[in-house]
Image: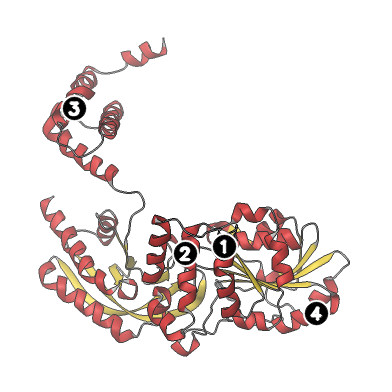
Amino acid sequence: MAKKENSEKISPKTRKLLRAIPKVDEFLDWVGSSTPAPLRLIKNEIRSLLAAERKTILAGEKRLVADLSREKLLPVFHKRLARRLESNFRTVINATGVVVHTNLGRSLLPEKAMASIQQVGSRYANLEFNLTSGKRGSRYQLVENLLCELTGAEAALVVNNNAAAVLLVLETLAKDQEVIVSRGQLVEIGGSFRIPDVMAKSGAKMIEVGATNRTHLFDYEQAITPESAMLLKVHTSNFRVIGFTSEVELNELVALGREHGLLVMEDLGSGCLLDLSPYGLPREPTVGEVIKAGVDVVTFSGDKLLGGPQAGLIIGKKRIIEQVKQNPLNRALRIDKFTLAGLEAVLRLYYDDQKALSTIPTLEMMTMPLEKISRRATRLARRIKKKLSPRCEVKTTATFSRVGGGAMPEHGLASRAVILAPGDRTVNELEQQLRDAPLPVITRIENDYLLLDMRTVSNDEVAQLGDCLLAAFAEKIKE
């Protein structure tokens, strides 16, 4: 009955338009057999397009019978089909200037890491096979010795990310027991990952001490009870509290833990293996320095300042790491062969500091000289300026890049950018057009200019970026 009532409300004009919508078989004849796509996908996209047209007509939006013709609908279909044939997971040009861009895949991997991933992915490998004994082996041994040599730790374990590392360690060592942590270190990072939430999920009982801006050693000491298992320090890498502040030094926390028989853990978040302060970056504690201070267990990410694949690295005292390894939860959080291959290749580069700085993309971009960035900006501007004039103003300008990934939030990296002021569209329209391009370009908008920070545009991407910009303006002319 309801369908009949709805049908009676449809106007003659709307009925005429609905009847003009082609049938699926008719549309298939329009497409023909030369379209390079699976028939199933072609039919699905035809149905989707026709359903969209039907919905538009019933919504009362302006339509003519001519809009439903072969000449009008077929180009729309081919454009939609082309999008469906594209991979959902695509490469983009990062012109934001954010080096460790969380939304764009964080750290780029070195060529050696990619070669190793390709090799173990296309061939059988000794993932869990001991080539010496001929028996079952452990995947963790593939990188454990490397991590120990590079950091001074007694043992190491790798899981799928740092949140998992923190969860696994707390669940193993402090479930149903108290973990004492400074109130000023209860951080939240991307994706609403909060230390208190992870601690609650682990079964540990969080005991907050101190104030947001000041925590003293006696705050920890006064909170210790027979139920206490651990003193936790969280490195606040993604924010800073400035002014009237105070926090307990790591060596003091370690001494307090030993005095009371408590474990001491530090979650570094973005773990550095090298001191980057000689290159103008803020001083961050290295993983080796934290281990040397006597901490029992340290957790940090593999895909931030380390410059490797996504992973959560757990290192520390052998007796502690062995307990963590035996936790059944470890199997649910373990990393695959691709991550292990990439991580091993990246770690091996750290045996030579200068080689690491020049071949690990994250480190290379973070420490890149301004002159090199300026040359790239000039090269791009020259490539497009004459061809876009007078439709678009093109200039180079000084700007600041960011490390990203929650690291060094206060520090801006002096950089150079190309800025565009289009005259035939808004800056927002150009920004969206570049995102929608076959090779998407991700940019920034500042002061009514489209800004392309050249720190994160590689040398071999400069020509590609220029072509993307020229294509965007050529497309506008066709419209």
Instruction: Identify which amino acid the numbered label 2 is placed on.
Output: Ala
Which residue type does callout 3 highlight?
Phe
Q: 227 or 10, which is in the foreground?
A: 227
The residue identified by callout 3 is: 27
Mark 3 or mark 1, which is nearer the start of the sequence? Answer: 3
User: What is the distance, in whole Å, between disc 1 and disc 3 at their CAs?
Assistant: 59 Å
Residue at image location 20% in from the left, 40% down from the top: 36
- Which residue appears farthest toward the bottom when viewing the image? 278
Residue 165 at x, y percent in the picture: 62, 62
Mark 1 lies on residue: 130
Q: Do residues under tags 3 and 2 come within 8 Å of each other at their CB atoms?
A: no
Residue under label 2: 341
Q: Which residue is mark 4?
A: 256
Q: At label 1, which amino acid type do we have?
A: Asn
Could you tell me which residue is drawn at 32 percent across and 70 percent down? 447
Identified by mark 4, the residue type is: Leu
Q: Position of residue 104 (x, y in %)?
A: 40, 61
Measured along the vertical axis of the image, is residue 214 above or below residue 92?
below
Q: Give how far apart the Cα atoms at labels 3 and 2 are.
A: 48 Å
Ranked by sequence position, the earlier of labels 3 and 2 is 3
